Image: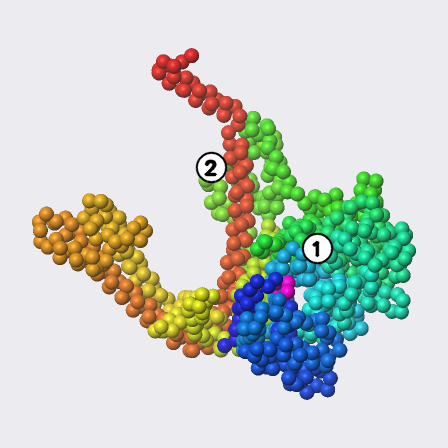
Amino acid sequence: MAIKKSDLYSSLWASCDELRGGMDASQYKDYVLFMLFIKYISDKYGNSDDFAPPVVIPPGAGFKDMVALKGKSDIGDKINTQVIQPLIDANTRLARSDFPDFNDSNKLGDGAQKVEKLGNLIAIFENPALDFSRNRAENDDILGDAYEYLMRHFASQSGKSKGQFYTPAEVSRIMAKVIGIGPDNTKAATTAYDPTCGSGSLLLKVAAEAGKHITLEGQEKDVTTAGLARMNMILHDFPTANVLSGNTLFDPKFKDGAQLRTYDYVVANPPFSDKTWSTGLTLGESGSGDSFQRFTWGVPPKKQGDYAYLLHIIRSLKATGKGACILPHGVLFRSNAEAVIRRQLVRSGILKAIIGLPANLFYGTGIPACILVLDKENATARKGIFMIDASKGFKKDGPKNRLREQDIHKIVDTFTRQDETDPRYARMVPLDEIASPANDYNLNLPRYIDSTEPEDLQDIEGHLRGGIPERDLEPLNPYWRIMPGLRASLFASLRPGYCQLRLPLAEVKPAIFAHPEFTAFHAATTALFAQWRQENTPLLTGFRQNDRPKPLIENLSESLLATFKPAPLLDAYDIYQHLMDSWAETMQDDCYLISDSGWLAGAQPREIRKVKNKEGKLVWPEPHDFTLGKRRFKSDLIPASLLIARYLKAEQETVTAAEAKLAEIEQQLTEMREEQSGEDGPLAEVIEGEGDKQKITAKALKARLKEIGRDPDYAEERQALTDYAKLLDRQTEAKARLKAVQEALEAKVAAKYPQLSDAEITTLVVNDKWLATLEAAVQSELDRVSQTLTGRIRVLAERYAAPLPQLVEEVEALARRVGEHLKKMGMAG
């Protein structure tokens, strides 16, 4: 049985994190990622009979040779000299600085501690599920994004100053999409470059978007991180990518003669506000001293390197080149030298768009950043800058924020279509407006996009004279446009500009749900989902072993988004997100399982065995579906609950009835114990334990009954004890009955799995599991529509329910009553 992809990654991370001990995550990652690298290349290229394999593995330098070193006292030295060094000697693209020192006692400990730590680390990667020999290409295999998964987790653990080697994948995907690269406009000679490439994830996202092997080049100042990037390229099947070490601004490595090499696409996530950017450079005021003419628009401040990297990128673009760069928001509005450069940038027309991102996305800083989209093609004819304020769209992910799938899609769609339908999210800002005296080339997004929530104003006349202001109903116009009769049935005119509810507040919600226009809207939306379901069910049921999951979810999600785009009142991106959440939580693992093993084998239960936890105790690692004797089983593809609901309803009802009977008896026991166990209660003598842990055992009852015998003075206690004992007997019988029917049900469940046909399995998975979950999610969005409407009407109705004169009159009446009471008490003044 194949291990689930998500389980593989999470268990890989958990194992590595547990072994880390006191070592800083930013250092330990180098060891873990090398292990993933050596395992991958050993599996994929170890037995290669290619004339010139991308990676050469000399005899004795593969993963199995590292396994053979486990337990040896000189394991660290042997890994360095017998595995790493031969790899470097055989592959010119690899350097010693790419790999950590496996004999470093300061990081790994001395003697037996080092031997044990390295042995355990190697053992993690001996997991049979980590078999990359069957690695399927197209970025859709068992390796998938294991490297990226580990990088993200190490970045989150690496502290404020050490997590900058990794650009969040969601931001990288946006950048790769907005530069416009794709299969239709690329070939092998298409070039992409990242001057501050870190671990290479951003370049790889560009390559993934291109859909083919293009030419990748990158430079990274930190030699160890550059090594990570080279390994990352090989792991993602780009072994020819060229990543060089060095300071890009002082010593750029990619040149054609004396000039900077230029590229079709350039992307970068430079260090924010780099205070050492000018180290080694001697620049005059007009940028003289730089042989590459990068600073002719002006020299950035010595303590703010953001524009230095941006100017390097612009210089590295071909005449029709496109680029994207992540920078802090300060570049949009800071004054002095940066204002001079910004004016030239805007006037050049090269700045095509600005995308404002949420705060706290990046590892190493919490400040908000933006993406500057650059395009030299037709720059002189450009009349405006497209601005998007996407700062509100994210989810919390531990201590950081994270873009959701819907946030990524909305940003890219809005940019691609230059969509200005929501001016509080995006608009095309004319250059004349930016250059006006009021703005003076300040690009701060709030100057051009007001994304703040409109203030909920209080209406003085409404409070004085009563009535709901018509103005307050205008924000609900999207509802009234498709349900005009609903508004008329809910509100009656009170006076010009004001109305009142026709119904008591408690009847508003039922009236909305029952109104023909609302039911028509509900039916139309339900029909949209039914249409999408009918069109896409063949895609799901037709998915087969060795098929690729990623194209499947791309087709499904794009189709769902297109289906619901025209739907009024619903946000199609919210519905899209439900599908993507379901994919991440369940469908992805299911599809990888089907792709690996097929429907029939994937549906069969696997036995769950106990594992040792950190304390060395044997524990069950996950919930089970059913038991046979003392053995536990689980089907990853078809939970037993789905199988029971479709085929074993009667048996489940028998179990439910037995559970209800047992619960009824236990409730009677609890009530009797609570009512009769007080200090002088007839059950006080047999109570054991304190508080919530109180109990009465059959043994204690028997002993007490024997003790009091037939003594008439204890008649009441004897009766209570006897009644309780009878209930305990009934509880024992009920438990035995429940156990028997549960075991019978579980036996039928176990017998049913092997009998399932392919058609039955696809019905259970596609209809009962995947589509049922999505259908419930669409229904929740419909419920939210109605709740938003009824909630707003309730707020307005309650706000203006009692006008001020009525309140004054009520206060005066209460004051008179209080005065009369005081007078009767002789306390009136």
Q: Position of residue 150 (x, y in %)?
A: 61, 66
Of 4 and 26, nearer the camera is 26
Q: For residue 346, say whether it is visible.
A: no
Which residue position holds label 2? 504
Residue 595 drawn above or below residue 668? below
Q: Which residues are magenta?
A: 25-29
Which residue position holds label 1? 414
Q: Position of residue 12 (x, y in %)?
A: 56, 69
> Residue reaching furthest front?
111
Q: Quadrant of residue 363?
A: bottom right
Check residue 37 in the rendering and tell me which mark sits there, or answer none. none
Residue sitting at x 56%, y 73%: 111
Residue sitting at x 10%, y 55%: 709
The amino acid at mark 1 is: Thr
Identify the mark nearer the N-term, 2 or 1. Answer: 1
Q: Along the horizontal axis of the image, is 135 left or right of 671?
A: right
Q: For residue 662, say whether it is visible.
A: yes
Q: In terms of secondary structure, what is the magenta stretch mainly?
A: helix
